[in-house]
Image: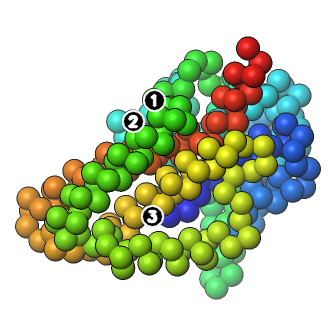
């Protein structure tokens, strides 16, 4: 969770474009980010891969009114609604975008291309049919915010007791330094998202960074098998909670528009 998921960028800026908050050029620039190229293949009515601008326009013409994010993990189909083929591809990629208003979903496949020393990243989004059903296990923003605060407090207590790297001021400083670099000139969410969604996503990303620092900095003081198992047990539910909160934040745009339409 050190980096923002590509599905999050596509959903957030795609939603802003569909709602008229940003231009196609600005949306595509934000979605591509530091990658070299994004294409979409499998779109109804298109014989081959197309660029993002054309793809987003075609999705709008097909009735897509919003985009949701799925961040599944083994045993946790977060944000998915089926069918099994789509779920399996999304699980392999650990992310997907599910369209609202048309039974379609998008799963990214990432390639590295170019000669040694000049490698760049290209992404192909595979457009596939999905089942029109409520997404799995996605909390409301309020639930996500409460869950994050509680999970972070509990995990910090356990990690501190085990003297695990990632639970103290050194880890906090590393997280702050990383965020300063990663967020320079970057908006947390696209225009049109409610402030609470921004707040929840920022907290979820911070929790995710702390988890990553704890994993990457070795075992800390947790040297026995039982302590290492306790650390894993402490991190697993927090990681799950952070992913749930990320999905709730990215999906808030569609959820708010649905409530407003009722």
Indicate left or right for 177 with 238 as reference: right
> Along the line of sight, which residue is nearer the eye, 5 or 150?
150
Indicate left or right for 230 with 140 as reference: left
Q: As displayed, is residue 220 above or below residue 81? A: below
Identity of the residue drawn at 48% across and 39% down: 144
> Along the line of sight, which residue is nearer the eye, 162 or 51?
162
Q: Which residue is mark 1?
A: 137
Q: Which residue is mark 2?
A: 76
Indicate the secondary structure of the residue bearing disc 2.
loop
Name the front one of labels 2 and 3: 3
- Identity of the residue furthest to the bottom in this view: 117
Could you tell me residue 219's position as x and y percent?
Answer: 22, 71
Name the front one of labels 1 and 2: 1
Q: Which numbered disc, 2 or 3, marks the residue that appears first in the sequence?
A: 2
Cβ–Cβ below 8 Å for labels 1 and 2? Answer: yes
Disc 2 from disc 3: Cα separation? 20 Å
Residue count near mark 1 (Cα–Cα under 10 Å), binned few <14, some 14–19, many ≥20: some
Could you tell me residue 246's position as x and y percent?
Answer: 53, 46
Disc 1 from disc 3: Cα separation? 22 Å
Q: Quadrant of residue 121?
A: bottom right
Q: Which residue is mark 3?
A: 209
Identity of the residue drawn at 67% across and 46% down: 195
């Amino acid at each position: 969770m050190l980096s923002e998921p590509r599905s999050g960028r596509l959903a957030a800026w795609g939603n802003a474009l569909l709602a008229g908050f940003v231009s196609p050029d600005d949306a595509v620039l934000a979605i591509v980010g530091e990658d070299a190229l994004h294409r979409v293949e499998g779109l109804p009515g298109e014989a081959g891969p197309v660029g993002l601008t054309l793809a987003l326009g075609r999705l709008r013409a097909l009735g897509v009114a919003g985009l949701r994010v799925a961040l599944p993990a083994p045993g946790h189909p977060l944000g998915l609604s089926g069918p099994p083929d789509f779920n399996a591809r999304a699980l392999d990629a650990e992310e997907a975008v599910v369209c609202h208003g048309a039974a379609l979903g998008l799963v990214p496949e990432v390639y590295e291309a170019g000669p040694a020393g000049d490698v760049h990243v290209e992404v192909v989004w595979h457009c596939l049919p999905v089942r029109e059903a409520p997404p799995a296990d996605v909390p409301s923003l309020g639930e996500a915010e409460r869950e994050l605060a509680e999970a972070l407090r509990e995990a910090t207590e356990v990690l501190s007791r085990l003297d695990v790297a990632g639970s103290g001021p050194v880890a906090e400083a590393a997280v702050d330094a990383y965020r300063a670099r990663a967020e320079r000139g970057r908006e947390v969410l696209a225009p049109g998202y409610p402030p609470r969604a921004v707040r929840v996503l920022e907290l979820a990303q911070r929790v995710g960074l702390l988890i990553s620092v704890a994993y990457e900095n070795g075992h800390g003081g947790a040297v026995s098998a039982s302590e290492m198992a306790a650390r894993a047990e402490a991190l697993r539910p927090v990681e799950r909670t952070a992913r749930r909160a990320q999905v709730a934040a990215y999906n808030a745009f569609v959820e708010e528009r649905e409530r407003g339409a009722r």
